[in-house]
Image (cartoon, grey):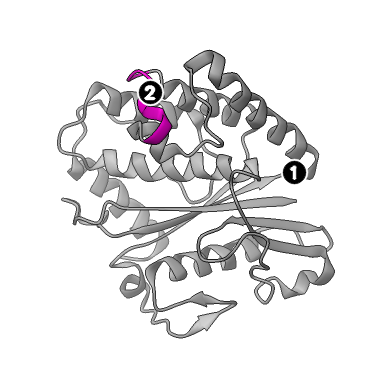
Amino acid sequence: MHLAIDDTYGPIDAAPSKYVTGARRTYVAVEFPDSQVQEVRNAIRDCLEELPDQLGIAPAEFHFVDIYNRNGVWKQVLAGKNLRIFEFFAEIYRHYRWRVHIQTVDNRTLTDHGIALAGSLDGIDLTKRDGQALLFLLLKLRRSIPSPRERLILRIDEGTGKADAPFAREIFHEWGERYDGRFAASVSEPLLQIADFLAFSINRSTHLQIKPQRTATDLWFLDLVGRMKIQSPDITQTTLPANFSVADIDSIHTKDRREKGVE
């Protein structure tokens, strides 16, 4: 099995919601069966090679916050055409339906569960919110993925570590030599670009759910992500009218938290 991990965050401002707060940090992991890995890598690289003819640009990789906001090379692309990339990646996901794991830590997560963290583990700083979210995700993965009888190849987007540096060997020590965990540059590992797409889509959807006034593009994006039907035990899916409110979102969270015994 291959795992690709990427993070996403923001916005930092407090949100007008009882449960969705600002300054949250989210990590997303995507499971890829070994048999699909090379096929997926080739598909992403082939798409990049098509962009000069299709859009007149030649980015080295897909980075979705830049694509959505038309930053960098994406400034040259007409508004709306950049969103075709999201449609393409959504179609890829609907074809493969990879299992996705999500972990968010915000300013109420630890207090909700009566947890206090300090120090570090496997080089992960547990005093910081991003380190806490990453640790919780890794522990969740360790519980849910197949036993150490299967080889596990994990790649996490570089940032807190240099590309090719080892990662999380202590957490996955049970796998022994069957574990290969490393930091990697997303430009050289297309699987991380899939993780980036899903991380951005999930975080953007969360933000749009509590946005006071949603545009037609906002509603299009929410519908696109909803139709992907992301396969994840960490997502609750529901259908709401286009004019849904923050109160509607909070009521969904209340129901979910009560079912889990959080409140």
Q: With respect to residue 197, does 132 lie above or below? A: below
Q: Residue at x 63, y 31 (%)?
A: 44
User: Does 256 lie within the magenta span?
Assistant: no
Is residue 172 found left or right of 11 in the rendered image?
right
Residue in view at x 21 percent, y 33 percent: 244
Q: CA distance from mark 2 to mark 1?
A: 36 Å
Of badges 2 and 1, nearer the viewer stands 2
- Residue 132, by quadrant, is bottom left
Q: Is residue 237 visible?
A: no
Identify the image quadrant of residue 34: top right
Residue displayed at 33% across by 59% down:
24
Question: Is 34 situated left or right of 22 in this image?
Answer: right
Of the image marks 2 and 1, the number of the one nearer the N terminus: 1
Which residue is under mark 1?
A: 33
Q: Is residue 78 magenta?
A: yes
Q: Which residue is mark 2?
A: 76
